Image (cartoon, helix red, strand yellow):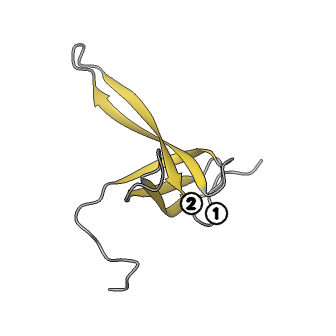
């Protein structure tokens, strides 16, 4: 195993869409999941925004990306960009 692929325990991974790429080396990723409402038992969509470290500024708004948990990098950033699954459709 190379040093870039060493796994340290069970780190969470999420797939989401980039909603902002304005900041330097940081993207905001919206992750949606489906859950059951505790009282009404209806399936609802719940979304959360994650601040993600993007070292090379490669991800753009609208891209679908995979992110992974990491050590705290700043006050809000504890996720890193793993890969870009698909690029945004350019109009």
| Residue at 37%, 82% in the rendered image | 3
- Label 2 Cα neighbours within 10 Å, binned few <14 / some 14-19 / many ≥20: many
Residue closer to the observer: 32 or 28: 28
- Which dot, 2 or 1, sits closer to the camera? 2
* x and y, in percent, of residue 62 in the image: 62, 47
Is 43 above or below relative to 27?
A: above
| Residue at 39%, 30% in the rendered image | 46
| Residue at 58%, 65% in the rendered image | 55
* x and y, in percent, of residue 34 in the image: 34, 33
Residue situated furthest bottom in the rendering: 1
Decide if residue 61 is on the left or right side of residue 71: right
Quadrant containing the N terminus is bottom left
Is 34 above or below relative to 50?
A: above
Is 42 above or below relative to 64?
A: above
Circle 1 residue = 58
Decide if residue 63 is on the left or right side of residue 68: right
- Label 1 Cα neighbours within 10 Å, binned few <14 / some 14-19 / many ≥20: few
| Residue at 46%, 59% in the rendered image | 80
Q: Are marks 2 and 1 in contact (CB under 8 Å)?
A: yes
Question: Across the whole image, how many numbered discs are drawn on residues?
Answer: 2
Residue closer to the observer: 46 or 68: 68
Residue situated furthest front in the rendering: 75
* x and y, in percent, of residue 29 in the image: 52, 45
Which SS class for mark 1? loop
* x and y, in percent, of residue 60 in the image: 66, 54
Circle 2 residue = 54
Inter-mark Cα distance, 2 to 1: 7 Å
Residue situated furthest top in the rendering: 40
The numbered disc on residue 80 is: none
Which SS class for mark 2? loop
Residue situated furthest right in the rendering: 91
């Amino acid at each position: 195993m190379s040093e870039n692929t060493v796994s340290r325990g069970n780190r969470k991974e999420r797939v989401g869409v980039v909603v902002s790429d304005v900041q330097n080396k940081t993207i905001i990723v919206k992750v949606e999941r489906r859950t059951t409402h505790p009282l009404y038992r209806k399936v609802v969509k719940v979304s959360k925004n994650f601040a993600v470290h993007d070292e090379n500024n490669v991800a753009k708004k609208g891209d679908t990306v995979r992110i992974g948990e990491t050590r705290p990098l700043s006050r809000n950033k504890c996720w890193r960009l793993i890969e870009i699954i698909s690029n945004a459709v350019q109009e």
